[in-house]
Amino acid sequence: MPKSFFESSIGLLKNKWLQFVLGIPLFFCMHHYQGIVVDAVLYLLQVIHSVSPDRFVNDPPFMFGNQDSFGFFTPLYKLFLDYFTIASGTKLACFLFQLLWIVSLISLVKGIGKSLKNRLWVLPITILFIGISADKMPHFEMLFVSFVQNYNCSRLLSIALGLGGLASLFSQKKWWSLILFAIGSVVHPLSAGWGLPIWFLVFFPKTKYLIMFFSAILPFTFLAHTGSLDILPDDWLKRPLLYRPDIWDMFRILIYVFFLWYFVPRKTSAAAAKTSKAIALILLIAFYWNMWGCLGKHILLYQLQTWRAEWLAWAVVTPFYFNILVMEIRKERNFFSFLKSRSCFVLCALALTLFPPINNPFFFVLAFVAESETSKRYFVNVIHKLGVTWVEKENIYVFILGVVLALWSVVSIVYADAVSLVLENTLPPFLLGGDFQVAESLVRSNMMACMLMAIFFAVYSACLKRYLPIFCFCSYLIFPFLSLAPLLGLLLLFFDLKLGKIKFVAFCFLLLCVVDGSLASQFRCQSFFDVFSNSFKPVMALWLYVLFVLFLFNITEKRMLQKLLGVVLVVSISSYAFCFWDGRSIEKRQTEETIELFKNKTIFESVQNRGKIFFYVTGSLVDMPRLQFLTGAYLSYNTHIGEIFYREQFFEARRRDNNLFYKQQRNKAHEKSEYRSFVMGSLSIRDTLIDRMTFLCSSEEITHLVSDFDDLPYAKQDSMRISVLDKEIYLYECPLNLKE
């Protein structure tokens, strides 16, 4: 490459605004607005309740208290709805909060790069981070909660402010970080609130002992047996408890703590190490509280949902890792020397631990052992005792990684096929560990680990100019049924075979691959592009597009053409983001237009006791009348929201569930999905609907029925035409007098 190419590249990397100019539209390309869904429904109803509480009389989520009291999000959200429609105001709020989120994230990456004196790599790390955390990618969520919400909610804004606080922390902006953490805590205490103890640990280190002491004794406050300082009664909430940590959650947290407490301080500056250790300590405290909350059933600690603190690790692990990777590469004489080094081996093991869907403890232990200064001598002795004396000391880590790839290829094949046989009822289900989702994640993680190691060896073989191994590793990445191809690649790489033996070995392996491929289950037949997620292909396409245009920019010496290419890149990505950011379907948009009809006046407003109305209006919101008509209701899909904080709400919602499901009290708690299935299934049968409504009315549970069924055998009291839905909605009053 000409010198001008590298000079131009350095110029691009030094540009302090390019990461924002490219990063922001890339973020919106990869995160699409979902509309008023999930928690966005909750916050919309809270705004409506703050304006018209009379709409929610005897509505369970507002009867005993409201989550709105824990934060300051409702007044802010209300400002958008005062000046815009519900659909457009909610969309605008989500866009602005996401914009703040990505600006804060880029600032955080810049802050970490600055603290490590690695500013040149802020742009590529930013683009890489945005890609691996894109919607539906493996690194996108913790438990069942996404790190980036594609709908309007307080958590989105709170974490955005928390990211800004972390960015200020790494940039040594003491009071700015405190202000951002404090505002974020006011918006959603359970998210950004975790940044406050980190701030004290960084700027007032002596508070560490006080924080640790308070954290240690807090779980034992259950001995007070008063209010939230007590053990969760067995009759409150459904068992097993939600948010319950499993063994994989424990591994994940411990791996994050190890990386931030042990590994990062050894590789970075003192200032970065201090912040990293503070985050690790808070993660450990959060996990300790989570165990007490979920397993010890401490009411307060369960309500705090301390697992939410994991966003802190997610935010800093990726930029830390890639900054350290760059720093370790620069320490070596050349890239090939780095590939053979202990640092490369440790970083490879950490990558296989930190980023796949399941954080595998095997690679965690491997990284921990290899990080020791005496690891090389230890590995050499073990390998030589096994009789493998031909491996050179300088290549010892490459050889060990090859052994790991060989073993893991076999393990991943066997386990994936075992899972498939379990699903076919050929093998017993205990092999899944009782959880298909975990088993599926393990299969994906194993395959991802093998593919990442195959990429490493493809690059290593390229450095050695060994083309046959490259062919084997790349074949495995492209053709998934060639699951044993990496073994052939390793054999050709590590053993100096003659041409005749190569042909024979290649033929045998090819035959074995064909046989294995023909017997392989569909469960493990995934290519490199599929094993990550369905979102990986568009992410890869966007990455390649950006790299291609930047490459053209660098090889072009004419200033005018460079400016044109820059404009084309930014405009094209921004245009794509503008066109596709709104991911709502046509049906969803029409539904939200319907909601607007009830912004200022709900349906059948003459009925004051809204919690005594049962709604059954067919359509996409048949199970969510509270959202559809912005009103209280006897039951709805989201009636159970908030019952973790209010015991009385849980009992009331359960009582109503039992009345509808069984026409008697069985004291059986249901999930939201069970209510949706019942409403969309059983109640869709006309006779079942009539039976349940008659019971609820006769037992004085409801006073009215609202439905779009015009052939029910009852006298109609009132009706309303909704032109958007092309429906007539009818009001029936108890007693539901049968027509003669």
Image (tube, helix red, strand yellow):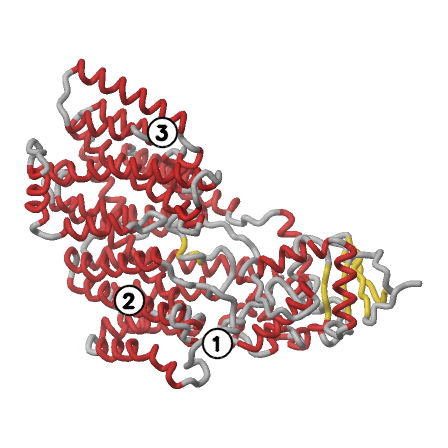
Residue 401 at x, y = what percent? 19, 39
Residue type at mark 2? Leu
Q: Within the image, what quadrant is residue 380 found in?
A: top left
Q: Which residue is mark 1?
A: 233
Query: For the residue carrying disc 3, how many other residues have a C-alpha within 10 Å: few (<14), some (14-19), or many (20+)?
Result: few
Residue 41 at x, y = what percent? 58, 63
Q: Which residue is mark 2?
A: 284
Query: For the residue carrying disc 2, how many other residues have a C-alpha within 10 Å: few (<14), some (14-19), or many (20+)?
Result: some
Q: Considering only vertical position in the picture, is 406 above or below 694?
A: above
Q: Which residue is mark 3?
A: 478
Residue 217 at x, y = what percent? 30, 79
Dot 3 lies on which element? helix
Dot 1 lies on which element? loop
Residue type at mark 3? Ile
Per the model, the C-alpha gap separating discs 3 and 2 is: 40 Å
Residue type at mark 1? Pro
Mark in the foreground, 3 or 1 = 1
